[in-house]
Image (spheres, rainbow, N blue to C red):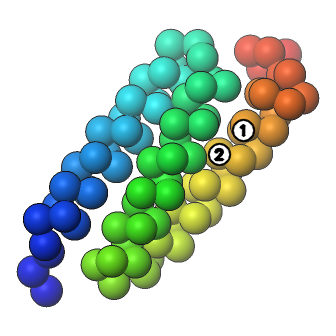
Amino acid sequence: MERTKFQKFLEIVASVIGVLALLITALGYPQVGFVIALFASALYATYGYLTKQYGIMVSSLIYGTVEIVGIIRWVFIGVNNGS
């Protein structure tokens, strides 16, 4: 199946946003990194659905669940640097 230009663009944007989220988290801002990563996971889930790659869609939903746990821990509970 040939991907459309939009699907190719969506894949690139999701990848760039995901790497940016990892970088932000690694630089010590997990509160922001987890939120951006959640957005990237939503884009990946959309990409998986549009391209009928349901494995990508399911794995991105699982990653999204992990990111929601991270947001809850770092933003709402206030876990600070693993202590």
Labels 1 and 2 touching (C-beta < 8 A): yes
In this rendering, is residue 23 above or below 28?
A: below
**Badge number at residue 67:** 2
Mark 2: secondary structure: helix
**Badge number at residue 25:** none
Q: Give coordinates of residue 63: x percent, y percent.
A: 58, 55
In this rendering, is residue 71 above or below 26?
A: below
The structure residue drawn at horizontal position 46% and vertical position 66%, both measured from the top left corner, is: 45
Q: Give coordinates of residue 11: x percent, y percent.
A: 26, 57
Residue furthest to the front in view is 6
**Badge number at residue 70:** 1
Tag 1: residue type? Gly
| 38 relative position to 2: left or right | right
The structure residue drawn at horizontal position 28% and vertical position 78%, both measured from the top left corner, is: 51
Q: Say if residue 56 shows up in the picture.
A: no
Q: Name which quarter of the figure residue 10 lies in.
A: bottom left
Q: CA distance from mark 1 to mark 2?
A: 5 Å
- How dense is the environment of label 1, judged by Cα within 10 Å: few (below 14), some, or many (20 and up)? many
In this rendering, is residue 11 above or below 74?
A: below
Q: Name which quarter of the figure residue 47 lies in.
A: bottom left
Q: Say if residue 50 shows up in the picture.
A: yes
Q: Give coordinates of residue 42: x percent, y percent.
A: 50, 57
Q: How many numbered tags mark residues here? A: 2
Q: Name which quarter of the figure residue 43 lies in.
A: bottom left
Q: In the depicted view, which residue is nearer to us: 4 or 67?
A: 4
Tag 2: residue type? Glu
| 81 relative position to 47: left or right | right
Residue furthest to the right in view is 77
The structure residue drawn at horizontal position 81% and vertical position 38%, both measured from the top left corner, is: 72
| 8 relative position to 25: left or right | left
Name the quarter where the C terminus is drawn: top right
